[in-house]
Image (cartoon, rainbow, N blue to C red):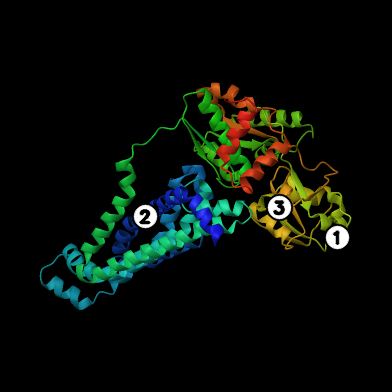
Amino acid sequence: MNEFISVFQQRQDILLETIWEHLQISLMSLIIAIFIAVPLGLLLTTHNRIAEPIIGISAIMQTIPSLAVLAFLIPFFGIGTTPAIIALTAYGLLPILRNTYTGIKEVNPALKEAATGMGMNSFKRLTKVELPIAMPVIMAGIRTSMVLIVGTTTIAALIGAGGLGELILLGLDRGADINLILLGAIPAALLAIILDIILRGFERISKKAGFKSFIAMLIIAVLVVASPFMINSSKNTDLVIGAKLGSEPTVLINMYKLLIEEETDLDVELRPSLGKTAFVFSALQQGSIDIYPEFTGTAIVTHLDQATESNDSQVVYQQAEQGMNAQYNMAFLQPMQFNNTYTVSTTQSFAEQYNLETIGDLKGIEDRVTAGFTLEFKDRYDGYVGMQDVYDLNLDTIRTMEPGLRQDALSNGEVDIIDAYATDSYMIELDLVTLKDAENLFPPYQGAPLLRNDTLDKYPEIEAILNKLGGKITDEEMREMNYQVDYEDREPREVAREFLTEQGIIE
């Protein structure tokens, strides 16, 4: 409990910011869902033949995994709040649509006939009789939709939309740090409960006030969403630098920002923790970000879908640089020294028990070993697919998991081997053994800034600035910086500035 309180005190400012982002994204999605679902539900009450198929379509939309929806939207809308709101709106439609349709259909026909007999036309009958009676049912649908949206908004952090999911993802990335996870999860749950209580109040009021309570609720929600735009003037950003999940890319993008802002008047915005490689690369292609740190081996194997021509780091860089320029019109700047290549790692005790020195040694115990691999590693040729081909391995048990969970699973004895990166901080913390890649399956993975050529054309000065990191940062230095962020809980910006200052790159 004391640790949680300490984390809470350290991150109060971030917590308040993410709560506000979470609330805004949720309310915006709810408002849009209401403006779509309520009129559509009213329309369907007069077109019974198409009502059930359309409601069925909205139900099907809820069955699509949210991560898949976000991945689909990125090429069209980039990263950030726009695709998140579109996805959340889609998830919030069904309860409102169904309850609007049901609420109107269940109004007593005798009341409708009486209203018609009094000379009311269909519009007056709807606004004066049907909607006031159906409003409690409609409000109940809005309540259900709100709770659903607030819970799902946590995943929006994967595409840079912000919200409390940022803290949860950070906790998962740091080896399932329970305090950070709770710091994001508890406020998200409380936010859902508080909003549900507020909407329940409007639902009760609607039994007397009818349509007026609905209008009041919408006005309040719109004011909350619009308040930042009325209070703060927007600040123009010249460059947006993104990063995958993890302490290492976060430290690197802070170095990029510090270097660029030190030597130019450009304003740089950082978008850390944007998820896996495919998400971040799509964001770069689409233009939602301008730069992100990528690895030479990943560029060749994943983006270019090629095999590396050599295991020489300079040859691999040239292949990656030329290929990314030719195929994607992107510039790959000078790589840093460290080689964050894939490794297959295990504990000292497990390696000694089975005399493991190389990856090929796993062949003799493939029916007894449990592997903990990331989804990305399991699906890549420079990963388990290549291990099957090159080392003729067919491991009986593979558990896929998020990168931040592997080390805990290994230290707890839930898995025997994991895929790891050479510069990961837990390599120090857990004193892991790296199995030698005798067949050179894993190519060099040197980090370097990747950006579109149009960005370089617009800001040519950043090439020389970012190339100051070329050939810098050894494996040990990168591993130590990751360790400081992951285990000593230092801020990535602070760690990045300290390194650049010690190297004399900035004052």
Judging depth in this view, the residue of 150 and 88 nearest the camera is 150
Q: Identify the mark nearer the N-term, 1 or 3.
A: 1
What amino acid is at disc 2?
Answer: Leu
Give the CA separation, mark 1 to mark 2: 53 Å
Q: Residue at x 31, y 42 (%)?
A: 231
Does dot 2 land on a helix, a strand or a loop?
helix
In the displayed structure, does residue 214 sit left or right of residue 191? left
Q: Residue at x 68, y 38 (%)?
A: 478
The picture places residue 27, in percent across and down from the top left corner, at 36, 55
- Position above or below: 468 against 428: above
Task: Please identify the residue farthest to the front as the structure is shown.
Answer: 2
The picture places residue 84, in percent across and down from the top left corner, at 46, 50
Does dot 1 land on a helix, a strand or a loop?
helix
What amino acid is at disc 1?
Answer: Ile
| Between marks 2 and 3 in the image, the one whose residue lies nearer the viewer | 2
Task: Say if residue 50 shows up in the picture.
Answer: no
Q: Which residue is mark 2?
A: 27
Q: Residue at x 29, y 72 (%)?
A: 105
Give the CA separation, mark 2 to mark 3: 38 Å
In the displayed structure, does residue 103 sit left or right of residue 88? left
- Position above or below: 371 against 387: below
Q: Which residue is mark 3?
A: 378
- Residue neighbourhood size for the residue with mark 1, other residues' Cα within 10 Å, grouped as few (<14), some (14–19), many (≥20): some
How many marks the image carries: the answer is 3
Q: Residue at x 46, y 55 (%)?
A: 153
The picture places residue 408, in percent across and down from the top left corner, at 68, 58
Judging depth in this view, the residue of 469 and 11 nearest the camera is 11
What amino acid is at disc 3?
Answer: Lys
